[in-house]
Amino acid sequence: MGRAPCCDKTKVKRGPWSPEEDTTLKNYVQKYGTGGNWIALPHKAGLKRCGKSCRLRWLNYLRPDIKHGGFTEEEDNIILTLYHNIGSRWSIIASHLPGRTDNDVKNYWNTKLKKKLLAEVTTRPTTTTTAAATATTTTSITNTSFSHVPSSALTTKIEANHFCNSVNNTMLPYYPLEANSHQSFMPEMLGISTQFPLPRLVEVPENGINSYSGFPTIPFSQEVSSFSPSFSLNNSGISASWSVNGGGEDNNTFLDEFDYGLSYDLLNIGFDFLEDKISEFNPSFTNSSDSFAG
DNA sequence: AACGGTTGCAACCGCACTGGA
DNA sequence: TTCCAGTGCGGTTGCAACCGT
């Protein structure tokens, strides 16, 4: 037995809204407000529509403060950053973009921004260098709208992917940002069998104590100029080690830019492929919104 | 011009959450 | 504490417009 429908589908109009319906809804809401009850609103307003449909039409289209038209470069970057940090929480992302709705942002991501990023990645020259990665290495993707992404971040993750693939063709999932964390961090996004930890970049207090024990962390107060991952395979599985060298001039920038690199590489992998691999590895994992460890 | 494929976006669906009774 | 109507949200679908052949 499923949930009772919110209205009788046979008695309400569905599909595209006519200009007359738009006018009726807009006039009613502007005159009387929603009254805190969308279900009752269409009847009061004289509309043969489901309340949910009215709400959606108002919020996504008729509201006076809605911004229509193309997204700016600045909006692109905000979406990219937030998508990496919190995933597909479109309403939260939209709340950072005045005049944009969650539906707008979601559609824009799915139809344009994701493809734009993929195009950037596929046209980027192949990186063959290893290990040492510095925050100031930005040359590989200049002349793009995301030229501030350091190749260090790209290289780090790409090598991790290649390494995992070369061992047993298995990957573990990207963990979304934890809700209570203060700032972005690098999740332990890849691993095999023993789930080797990749570093998390987390905001930690000046005393250096943080709640993510067991993982290397980089306090914001620490200057960072290079970030060097290395991998090895031995009898006990895979081990990964990381080193961070001081001397950077702006490590907040480095951390922020690292986030962009992460987004690039998630796209480079392909979400579908990644999830298929995860499912093979652990049948209890069903989709990207699930918690793998939970 | 006609057709088929692709794109972009409005709208819908259904589950999760919330708050009041 | 439990129940449930109303609301919020993310994923998905439908379709018109566009594009290439």
Image (spheres, coloured by chain):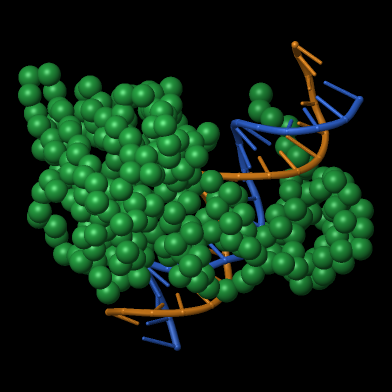
Chain colours: A green, B blue, C orange
Across and down, in percent, residue A233 comes to 9, 28
Give how far across and how far down residue A160 sits, in percent. 19, 41
Instruction: Identify the residue at the far left of this view.
Output: A234
Instruction: Report x, y in % for residue A129.
Output: 10, 53
* Viewer-nearest residue: A129 or A57: A129
Q: Is residue A124 visible?
A: no
| Side of B20 relative to A135 (left or right) | right
The residue at 20%/66% (across/down) is: A139
Q: Position of residue A225 (x, y in %)?
A: 24, 51
Tell me if residue A216 comes above or below residue A10 in the rendering. above
In the image, residue A15 sits, relative to residue B2, either above or below, namely above
Q: Residue at x 35, y 70 (%)?
A: A145
Look at 52% across and 35% down and name the residue there. Answer: A179
Q: Is residue A57 visible?
A: yes
The quadrant holding residue A63 is bottom right
Which image quadrant is residue A1 in? top right
